[in-house]
Image: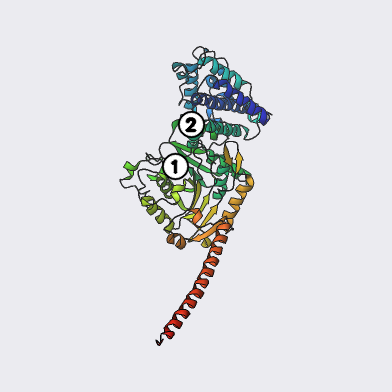
């Protein structure tokens, strides 16, 4: 069985091979698809050999699609790819892509979404050797790695895939936040929402599906059956949508429904003519986007029950879509920018309606520089359509801005810090300088702002505030004494003048 370090080293070698020839936007397309194809081919052959041993029927084992989770036809198997040379390799790979998708509806768009021949048309190779040299080299390199189940630690290939996605996010800088949520933030969101077996879970802006993968991972840790989860998602960017499906498959997650399209303007998860509703919705939507679909929203849209967000920011468009797709006992966890907590105008009106309907259970402020997309301190909003009796009419505010560890170019949450946030949320408790349970009435008195600093005060602020009161009290006593003395002197002068007081 291959060790994790050796597997990571081998995949890193494939990355270096392509990096020397292609731009990152191109080489990751080829690497992810050929990585998945090698995995599918190896597992298919492993299954076919087992079936042949059990049935003694070679033709059944190798040529009957219905007995395989994924059927890989003869001229699409890795052994066929190994015999391809530089001549016409792009067209041959395109043929392989069409054939394998033709047999497996779950793989629709995964392989055919890239034109391997396009690598040559665009002449993307960076030096004198053409693109075919590097694609043939990639096939030969991956041929050295055995991706059969019997040779891999369970989940190992999925971990490597996540590592690759994170590296691409880091390389992409701010753009990386468009498709990737950092590992510890994913863990935090999922632990706050506590997914259970048989639940339906949706990420309407799923990026590379990292949050959905984390839901499965945490169910495994709980010793629950992750195959009983119903996973849904939608992603607007075509290539990111493909990577999401590959990411799930390389994690051995096969039961999912990930749709392509803009979730605000083209929601795809529809059942019986209505938007589907879920037990849990988990999301890290884009912040403050302007082209979110304001023009369409001006017409009646039942999702925007609390009001139409401003044209300049779609934050509350995503929030209202998520609330609309929560079932009657559903909960949601959403990463939001700071402005969501306090901006006025139409956003203030929307926030007021959501607060008055008692849908917000917690506001959790995070440390700055946790995300690739921004260095500002973001927050997590937890929504609950079925609050317990002791939480009704209340919101928990958690100030976790100091919960972080320096991690090279950005900050990160340690396991201990993550545990602290989760424990305080589950206990729904006050903790000095850290958390405060606040009534909706008090929030209303504060003009419905959700700014955490309004409700969770540092200890030194409280001490200084008390000291200031004492200081002012002493000044008042002193002034009272001075006033009494002055009045006494005035009275003496009046008596000397012979005037009755």
Please provide percent x and percent y for residue 333: 50, 48
Secondary element type, mark 1: loop
Q: In this view, does 216 lie to the left or right of 352?
A: right
Q: Tag 2: Cα neighbours inside 10 Å, few (<14), some, or many (≥20)?
A: many
Q: How many labels does the image show?
A: 2
Please provide percent x and percent y for residue 286: 45, 40
In this orientation, does residue 294 appear?
yes
Q: Mark 1 points at which residue?
A: 287
- Viewer-side residue, 354 vs 367: 367
Q: Tag 1: Cα neighbours inside 10 Å, few (<14), some, or many (≥20)?
A: many
Please provide percent x and percent y for residue 485: 49, 77
Q: Say which quarter of the image contains residue 147.
A: top right
In this orientation, does residue 56 appear?
no
Secondary element type, mark 2: helix
Using the image, determine if residue 450 lies above or below residue 469.
Answer: above
Query: Which residue ends up furthest to the left in the rendered image?
Result: 299
Q: Say which quarter of the image contains residue 236.
A: top left
> Which quarter of the image is occupied by the N terminus?
top right
User: Which residue appears at 48% of the width and 77% of the height?
Assistant: 484
Q: Distance between the residues labelled 2 and 1?
A: 23 Å
Q: Mark 2 points at which residue?
A: 242
Nearest to N terminus: mark 2 or mark 1: 2
Please provide percent x and percent y for residue 192: 55, 50
């Amino acid at each position: 069985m291959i060790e994790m370090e050796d597997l990571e080293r081998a995949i890193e070698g494939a990355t270096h091979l392509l990096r020397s020839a292609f731009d990152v936007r191109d080489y990751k397309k080829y690497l992810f698809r050929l990585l998945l194809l090698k995995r599918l081919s190896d597992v298919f052959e492993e299954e076919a050999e087992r079936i042949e041993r059990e049935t003694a029927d070679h033709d059944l084992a190798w040529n009957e699609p219905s007995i395989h989770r994924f059927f890989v036809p003869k001229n699409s198997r890795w052994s066929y790819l190994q015999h391809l040379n530089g001549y016409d390799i792009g067209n041959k790979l395109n043929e392989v892509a069409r054939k394998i998708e033709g047999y497996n509806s779950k793989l629709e768009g995964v392989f055919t979404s890239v034109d391997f021949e396009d690598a040559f048309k665009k002449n993307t190779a960076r030096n004198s050797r053409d693109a075919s040299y590097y694609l043939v080299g990639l096939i030969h390199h991956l041929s050295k790695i055995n991706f059969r189940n019997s040779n891999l630690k369970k989940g190992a290939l999925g971990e490597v895939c996540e590592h690759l996605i994170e590296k691409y996010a880091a390389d992409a800088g701010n753009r990386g936040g468009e498709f990737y949520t950092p590992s510890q933030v994913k863990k935090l969101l999922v632990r706050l929402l506590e997914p259970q077996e048989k639940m339906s879970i949706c990420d309407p802006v799923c990026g590379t599906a990292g949050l959905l993968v984390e839901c499965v991972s945490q169910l495994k840790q709980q010793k629950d059956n992750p195959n009983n989860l119903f996973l849904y998602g939608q992603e607007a960017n075509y290539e990111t949508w493909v990577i999401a499906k590959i990411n799930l498959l390389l994690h051995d997650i096969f039961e999912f429904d990930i749709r392509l399209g803009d979730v605000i303007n083209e929601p795809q998860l529809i059942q019986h003519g209505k938007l589907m509703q879920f037990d849990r919705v988990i999301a890290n939507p884009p912040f403050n986007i302007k082209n979110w679909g304001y023009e369409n929203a001006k017409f009646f849209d039942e999702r925007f029950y609390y009001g139409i967000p401003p044209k300049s920011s779609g934050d509350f468009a995503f929030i209202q879509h998520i609330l609309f797709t929560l079932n009657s006992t559903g909960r949601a966890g959403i990463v939001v920018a700071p402005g969501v907590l306090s901006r006025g105008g139409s956003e203030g009106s929307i926030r007021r309606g959501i607060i008055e309907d008692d849908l917000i259970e917690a506001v959790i402020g995070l440390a700055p520089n946790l995300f690739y997309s921004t260095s500002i301190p973001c927050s997590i909003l937890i929504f609950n359509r079925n609050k317990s009796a002791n939480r009704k009419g209340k919101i928990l505010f958690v100030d976790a801005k100091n919960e972080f560890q320096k991690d090279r170019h950005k900050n990160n949450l340690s396991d201990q810090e993550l545990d602290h946030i989760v424990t305080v949320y589950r206990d729904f408790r006050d903790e000095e300088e850290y958390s405060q349970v606040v009534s909706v009435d008090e929030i209303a008195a504060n003009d419905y702002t959700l700014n955490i600093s309004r409700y969770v005060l540092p200890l030194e602020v409280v001490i200084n505030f008390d000291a200031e009161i004492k200081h002012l009290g002493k000044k008042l006593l002193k002034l009272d004494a001075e006033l009494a003395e002055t009045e006494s002197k005035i009275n003496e002068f009046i008596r000397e003048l012979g005037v009755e007081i």
